[in-house]
């Protein structure tokens, strides 16, 4: 049975309106994951800017992030979206430690596949 949400508040933090940028970047629970993934110095850049500027900055690694960052960024966005949807529709939330292990596993698998050729 699918759960229909009647409030625009984030169901994870119950503090802010649940927009796409809130889900993927600004939610306090999502920020815990991001802060565990990126170097401390890059935290300043991770939570700055509007939605499109933030996406473009992270998808174009440039000098701020290592060359593998755009791929890892995409993996993290996808897993955060799945994590949140699982919580909204099933009422269960995996731990941030489980999420970090999934991110690491998918990143290794993708790196292996990319290096095969």
Image (spheres, rainbow, N blue to C red):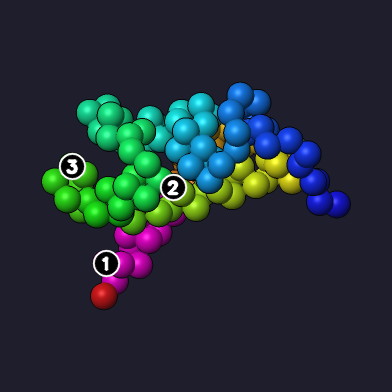
Q: Is residue 74 magenta?
A: no
Q: Residue at x 40, y 45 (%)?
A: 51
Between circles 3 and 2, the one closer to the viewer is: 3
Question: Distance from label 2 to label 1 (Cα)?
Answer: 20 Å
Snapshot quadrant of residue 88: top right
- Left-right relation of 96 to 37: right
Instruction: Indicate the secondary structure of the residue bearing disc 1.
Output: helix
Q: Residue at x 61, y 24 (%)?
A: 15
Side (left or right) of 57 relative to 30: left
Looking at marks 3 and 2 on the same chain, the residue that comes earlier in the sequence is marked by 3
Question: Label 1: which residue?
Answer: 115
Residue labelled with disc 2? 76
Farthest residue, direction bottom: 117
Q: Earlier in the sequence, mark 2 or mark 1?
A: 2
Q: Residue furthest right?
A: 1
Across and down, in percent, residue 37 comes to 36, 36
Tag 3's secondary structure?
A: loop
Q: Are marks 1 and 3 in contact (CB under 8 Å)?
A: no
Q: Nearer the viewer, residue 48 or 73?
A: 48
Q: Magenta residues, as a range?
A: 105-116
User: Which residue is labeled 3 in the image?
Assistant: 64
Q: Could you tell me which residue is drawn at 33 percent across and 38 percent down?
A: 49
Residue 115 can be seen, yes or no: yes
**Alpha-carbon distance for marks 3 and 2?**
18 Å
Q: Going by the picture, which residue comes out furthest to the top?
A: 15
**Which sits earlier in the primary sequence, circle 1 or circle 3?**
3
Q: Identify the residue at horizontal 76%, vertical 42% (top origin).
A: 5
């Amino acid at each position: 049975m699918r759960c229909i949400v009647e409030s625009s508040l984030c169901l994870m933090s119950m503090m802010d309106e649940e927009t796409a940028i809130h889900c993927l970047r600004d939610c306090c629970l999502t920020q815990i994951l991001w802060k565990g993934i990126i170097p401390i110095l890059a935290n300043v850049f991770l939570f700055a800017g509007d939605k499109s500027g933030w996406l473009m900055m992270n998808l174009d690694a440039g000098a701020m992030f290592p060359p593998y960052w755009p791929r890892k960024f995409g993996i993290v966005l996808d897993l955060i979206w799945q994590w949140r949807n699982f919580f909204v529709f099933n009422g269960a939330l995996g731990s941030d430690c489980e999420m970090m292990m999934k991110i690491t596993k998918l990143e290794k698998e993708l790196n292996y596949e990319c290096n095969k050729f």
